[in-house]
Amino acid sequence: MSREECNIALLIGKKLESFEEDGERVLLVCDDGSAYEMYHMQDCCEHVAVHDIKGDLRSLTGSMIISAVEDVSGDWPADVELDYRPESFTWTTYTIQTAEAVCIIRWLGQSNGYYSENVYFGMTHKPIQLAESPSLE
């Protein structure tokens, strides 16, 4: 899949039409036909995934996005408890807001410190919906 990295602020003024989220990536499709993806390019021995989503992505659909911000931090959030702390970690938080709702997507990247823990936001292709083929009965 071809991607062009960009700033999440490009979402401001757009309306979210649909989304997909599977823990490894978040795909946002806007009503103007543009599509964007949050993802990590896996190298070897790191683990980067969506840790949690505060709010409901569905609540953002159909309304104009008025704020879209990325925050990258090496500080452990006070509201997250784990039995252990990884040797190296990076929190990447995306906050997307409309007049009616706000959604916060938090990614946690973990590694031994050698591998990238980055999350990328990039323009991608809108997924193609194949029409059902007619029955040949």
Image: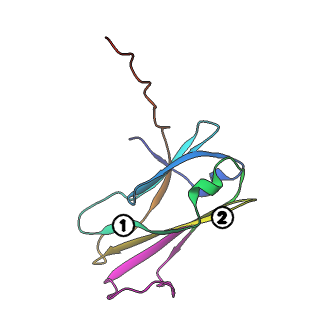
Identity of the residue drawn at 64% across and 39% down: 31
Stretch in magenta: 71-94
Which kind of residue does numbered mark 1 sit on?
Answer: Val
Which kind of residue does numbered mark 2 sit on?
Answer: Val
Query: Is residue 80 shown left or right of residue 94?
Result: left
Give the distance between the C-alpha atoms of the residues marked 1 and 2, in whole angstroms.
23 Å
In front of the other: 67 or 16: 16
Q: Give residue 80's position: percent from left, percent from top.
A: 46, 83
Query: Is residue 57 shown left or right of residue 14?
Result: left
Quick check: can you spot residue 121?
A: yes
Sequence-wise first label, 1 or 2: 1
Q: Is residue 28 magenta?
A: no
**Which quadrant: the C terminus?**
top left
Residue 65 vs 95, above or below: the answer is: above
Q: Is residue 73 magenta?
A: yes
Q: Which mark is residue 48?
A: 1
Q: Which residue is mark 2?
A: 102
**Which quadrant: the N terminus?**
top left
Label 1 Cα crowd, 10 Å radius (few <14 / some 14-19 / many 20+): many
Query: Is residue 45 shown left or right of residue 26?
Result: left
Residue 88 vs 99, above or below: the answer is: below
Q: Give residue 86's position: percent from left, percent from top.
A: 32, 83
Q: Secondary structure at mark 2?
A: strand
